Image: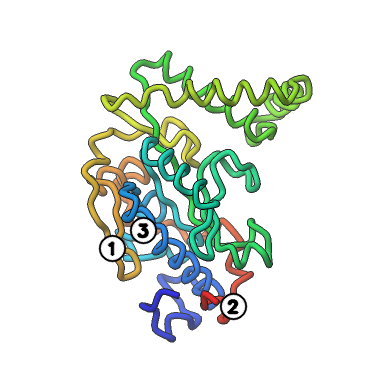
């Protein structure tokens, strides 16, 4: 277990008007343990990763977790992501007590990104109930509206066939249409489509791309696009008293992702955890066993 948490860290606390229960603190500690191991793994294997999304916002605005946040997000350029998946597969997708679920594993179908889980809690509460870190691959984005429409549409089809999961939050017609497509498409064709679509949506990783994107990020295709110059060279940022790598121009990324007022707290009604992982963690779950 990482050793930089004092005992009082795990006590109930009010942070910026939000009640942080000790169960949330234990979940944070479990996630930090996963993050520390990812950091060591990436350094050893010369893989570049970036603290991303709410994790990066928390690092800048709170020097750690956003009080109502209950997960950690990271990102990798596609080349590093594929290298990471290959090395993980060679070692049985295990780092100590932690398990890597590949992007196309489909066990936890949020999106085709990588997930590293607290394996001990996954055995007890299932993957949905275990602390995890998301790893988003970042892909090159083509120039021009037409090719971007092609990439965006292809990425949605990729998700549909890879996960065999009808569209949600896209309207009743889209859901019915995707259900029908899945019903009439045999499995061998779905697998063929997945291979072809992945090749297409990742085909703009030439090393000369001006912009990159997390194709399956929660902000949506257009909002996920960022200039490549924001990313490299990587720099470090403090998160919960430790240094981790992140994008070169942190401020530009946060302004683009969250707006010019990203340092301002959201309204109280928006300060709610997105997951329910913390309910599975208790004081004893801080130990690595």
- Mark 3 — residue? 39
* Above or below: residue 279 compared with residue 188: below
Would residue 212 be found to the left or right of residue 69 on screen? left
Q: As drawn, is 193 to the left or to the right of 138?
A: right
Total numbered labels placed on residues in the image: 3
Measured in 3D between alpha carbons, the distance from the residue under mark 1 to the one under mark 3, in whole angstroms, is 10 Å
Q: Where does label 2 land, which residue? A: 282
Q: Which image quarter: residue 61?
A: bottom left
Q: Nearer the viewer, mark 3 or mark 2?
A: 3
User: Label 1 crowding class (10 Å Cα cut-off): few <14, some 14-19, many 20+?
Assistant: some
Q: CA distance from mark 3 to mark 2?
A: 25 Å
Q: Name the element at disc 2.
A: loop
Q: Is residue 169 left or right of residue 240?
A: right
Classed neighbour count for the residue bearing mark 2: other residues with Cα under 10 Å, few (<14), some (14–19), many (≥20): some
The first of marks 3 and 2 along the sequence is 3
Is mark 2 in CB contact (under 8 Å) with mark 1? no
- Answer above or below: position of 4 versus 90: below
Q: Which numbered tag is attached to residue 243?
A: 1
**Image location of residue 188, percent across then percent down:** 71, 23
In the image: residue 19, left or right of residue 260: right
């Amino acid at each position: 277990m990482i050793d930089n948490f004092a005992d009082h860290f795990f006590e109930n606390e009010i942070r910026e008007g939000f009640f942080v229960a000790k169960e949330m603190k234990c979940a944070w500690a479990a996630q930090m343990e996963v993050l520390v191991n990812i950091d060591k793994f990436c350094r050893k294997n010369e893989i570049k990763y970036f603290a991303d999304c709410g994790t990066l916002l928390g690092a800048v605005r709170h020097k750690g977790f956003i009080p109502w946040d209950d997960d950690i997000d990271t990102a990798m350029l596609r080349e590093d992501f594929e290298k990471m998946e290959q090395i993980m597969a060679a070692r049985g997708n295990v780092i100590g007590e932690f398990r890597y679920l590949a992007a196309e594993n489909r066990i936890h179908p949020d999106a085709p990104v990588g997930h590293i889980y607290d394996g001990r809690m996954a055995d007890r509460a299932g993957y949905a109930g275990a602390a995890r870190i998301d790893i988003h691959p970042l892909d090159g984005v083509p120039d021009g509206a037409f090719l971007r429409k092609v990439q965006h549409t292809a990425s949605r089809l990729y998700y549909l066939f890879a996960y065999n999961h009808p569209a949600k939050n896209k309207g009743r017609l889209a859901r019915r249409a995707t259900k029908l497509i899945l019903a009439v498409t045999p499995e061998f064709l779905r697998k063929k489509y997945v291979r072809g679509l992945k090749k297409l949506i990742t085909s703009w990783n030439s090393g000369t791309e001006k912009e990159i994107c997390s194709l399956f990020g929660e902000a949506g295709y257009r909002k996920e696009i960022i200039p490549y110059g924001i990313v490299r060279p990587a720099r470090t940022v403090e998160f919960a008293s430790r240094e981790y790598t992140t994008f070169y121009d942190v401020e530009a990324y946060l302004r683009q992702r969250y707006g010019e007022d990203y340092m301002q707290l959201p309204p109280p009604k928006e300060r709610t955890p997105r997951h329910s992982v913390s309910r599975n963690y208790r004081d004893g779950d801080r130990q690595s066993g």
